Every structure is written in C-alpha cells, then in structure tokens.
Amino acid sequence: MYRSRESHDPIVITGIGLIASVGDNRESVWQAVRAGRSAARRLEGLPGIPDGLLLGAPVDIEPEIPGQLKVITLCQRSAAEAIEDASIDFGRIDRNRFACAISGHMGDTSWVNEQLSIHHLLSAVPWWHQWLPNTACSAVANRWGLNGPRLCHSTACASGLIDILGAARALRDDQCDIALAGSAEAFHPLFAAGFHQMRVLANHDDPRQACRPFDETRDGFIMGEGAAMFVLERLSHARRRGARIYAEILGGKTLADAHHLTGVDLESDALARLISETLRASGLKPKQLEYINAHGTGTQQNDLAESRGIRRAMGSAADALCISATKSILGHLVNAAGSVELAITTLAMRDGFLPPTLNLTRPDPQCDLDCIPLVGRNNQFLHAMKLSVAFGGHMAAVAIRRWNETPAGFAYPSKLVAA
C-alpha cells in the first residue's frame, strides 16, 4: 500500500490501548498473554443460542450509556488508553489533521429482534443511532473532535490490519499528521450461529484448551471479544511533541486469495506473495524477519495453508523464524483480530519476549515451524510481521521494527524474566 522505507519521515506507533477477555488494559492483557493465561468459558445469554453450546472469551464491561453497543464501549475504552499512552495534549494538536480509522462492526439488531418478537431491549440509545457499521468510528472521532479523514473497512478478519494500513497511508499522503486506528469486536448471535453452522468452532470439556493452533488435534477456534487502538504519526510530528515511540511501521500489503469465500488455497500462492511483497515494501530480507504473529485460527485448513505460505516465502530463513498464534489465548476477535494481535506483537517486541501458542501439545508435522509451544521465551527481536487471512479472500500483512533510538525509544529491560 505504501513504502515507508523510501520516505524521510517514517510512520511510528506512539500509543497503544488494549482490552480483551484477560484484562481491562494494555499491560494486564499483555501479562496474561505472556503467561499463556486464557479466560475462555462456555457462553450464556446470546439471544437464540442455547446457553453453554458455544465457547468464547468474553469481556465483562459495562456500557457507558445503557443499551450502547458493546463494540462502541470497547472502542471508547481502548481509544482513551491509547490517547493517554501517547501523551496527547489536545491543546497542542491540530484536530483538523487528526484522522480516525476504525473497522466496521455488526450494527444494532435489537429493533429487528423486537419486530420478530424474539428479544426486546430497553435502551437509552435508539437503534438507528448505532445501526451502521461505521458507528464506532464516528463515535470515537466525535468524542475527541477528530476532524481529519475517517476510514472504516469491513474486510472480515483482516479489518483491523487494513484500517491500520489505511491510517498509515493517510499519513503518508499528508492527509493528516496523526491518527487513531484500530478495531473492536463483541459477540453477536448472527456471527455465532454462522460460525457454528460452518463447523469452524472448537469444542472441549475445558474451554481454555479448546483452541489448538498448529496442533494435530486442532478442530477450530473459539470466539473472542476485545479491542486495540493505536496512535500513529509521522516521526517528525512525534519528535516535535516529545513522544515515546514503540515501533516503526516499515510497510504493509493487502492482497486477495481469489479461491473461495471461506476456504483457503492450500498451495498458499497468495499468502506467500503477500509475505514476500511485504518484506520488499519494508526493505527487509527474509533472514531479518525474526517473528510472525500468525493468523493461526486452529482450523485444519488455515494452519496448514499458513505454514506452507510462510515456508514458501521465507525459504531456508523459515527454520530460524519464531511464530505465535495468540488466538489460542484470546480467542478469534474477527474484526479486531488484526489490531489486537499487532498490539501484542508490539508489546512483545518492546519487552523482548515471544508469547506462546497455548495448547500446542502435539505439533502437526505438516506445520513444520517453530510455533513456540505452551511457554513463551525471551528473545530480543528487532523485526516482526503480523498476518491476517480473512473470509472472503482478504489478506493483509504489516511489518514493524522496534524503535531503539534514544531518548524516544524503549531500551530492552536489563533483566528479562519469563512469565
């Protein structure tokens, strides 16, 4: 989408907000992921879905306004944390040059349910105020008075990454100086029923052991809730205001797998090309890439195709590559998967610690990569990539580099202790 390495003004990450089933803020979520601590359980209270039928990793959070869509509440909370983390002083920021890019989401279907006599929701928020999939983007931008470009993509599981790339492109094109970008996901009975009908959801007596990416016994994913938001800006803008910097977004690409609506190409041609083109756009050679946060859903098809695509693109460098599938811990956050997992990747890079793939007790020999089974490990890596492979053939990748320049960068901790 763009080639930041050719620019004299890189795009950098200066703030992160994060909420998921395992924690209500950035650091609590990250510490749980480090430790491989899952909060998955049997789901109850989804209209039309029998209690206990499905597994998931929900977020327990109260709406700011009674009846407000949960996804909007998640966006607001994570956006507030990202803005605070980035030390944004709105008295010194041009709001007309502040963009907002937040992925699409399911709208309010309570009115439809009411008309069908299935469910009645008494709400202080009229359904038509939160019907459109861009409602969260508008709500967040309006709350902080962000008058720059507003972007909202609806590209299934790739939405979070694609909105981050969209914000980076707006910065690159000088449409704005700073951007808030990310996505959120909350359970919706239509999605739940659809995934159940597709037979892609895992089941297990212990919900925390259900999602088993890259394992021989894998049988699908569990649903997750949460949100991640990033503050992105051009390096010159970040330096002028004295911001701390997590990482540089080296480059990113979006491609299509024109194969099937929900199936994946097991030959992995498109995924291999996506990885190779992202490396080229980022100015990286395969041997320089040390870590990939995989899409890693835990389905038979996805994990096999992703393993093959990574190996085809990386060649012999794949033998030294480390890979995590953090959906094993947080569940599949669908629209928010890309942004949440990129946040985890950035924090892993900050602390020099590779998060584990939970429940990987019997690695599939066909997925012949180092997927960091069960326990994370110390690794002061410099370059990483996040992959998203979505229903509908949407594919996205983002490569980042740890920012070590002083005084803005984060030095590695002098003592690294495994969680």
Image (tube, rainbow, N blue to C red):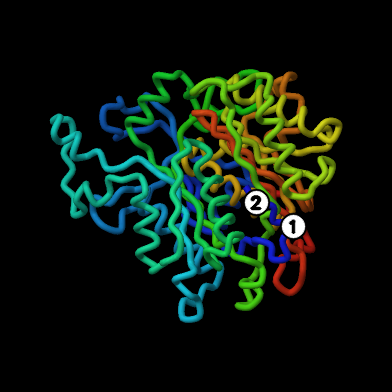
The secondary structure type at the circle numbered 1 is: helix
In this rendering, does residue 291 appear at all? Answer: yes
Q: Nearer the viewer, residue 135 or 342?
A: 135
Res. 90 mark = none
Q: Which element is circle 2 on? A: strand
- Image location of residue 124, percent across then percent down: 18, 54
The residue under the point 61% across, 72% down is 237
Of residues 315 and 223, the one nearer the viewer is 315
Q: Residue at x 23, y 54 (%)?
A: 66
Residue 230 on image: x %, y %: 54, 58
The answer to whether residue 262 is above or below residue 17 is above
Residue type, label 2:
Tyr
330 w.r.t. 259: above or below: below
Q: Residue at x 34, y 58 (%)?
A: 139
Mark 2 touching mark 1, by CB under 8 A?
no
Q: Is residue 225 left or right of residue 412?
A: left
Read off the residue under disc 1. Answer: 6
Q: Residue 198, percent across and down? A: 44, 19
Question: Is residue 314 shown above or below 299?
Answer: below
Residue 35 picture quarter = top right
Counting the numbered discs, the total is: 2
Looking at the image, residue 277 lies above or below residue 201:
below
x, y percent for residue 202: 50, 24
How far apart are labels 2 and 1 at the CA level?
A: 9 Å
Q: Residue at x 49, y 44 (%)?
A: 336
- For label 2, the residue is 2
Q: Counting other residues with Cα less than 10 Å from the Cα at mark 2, is it few (<14), some (14-19), or many (20 or more)? A: some
> In screen coordinates, is 142 left or right of 325?
left
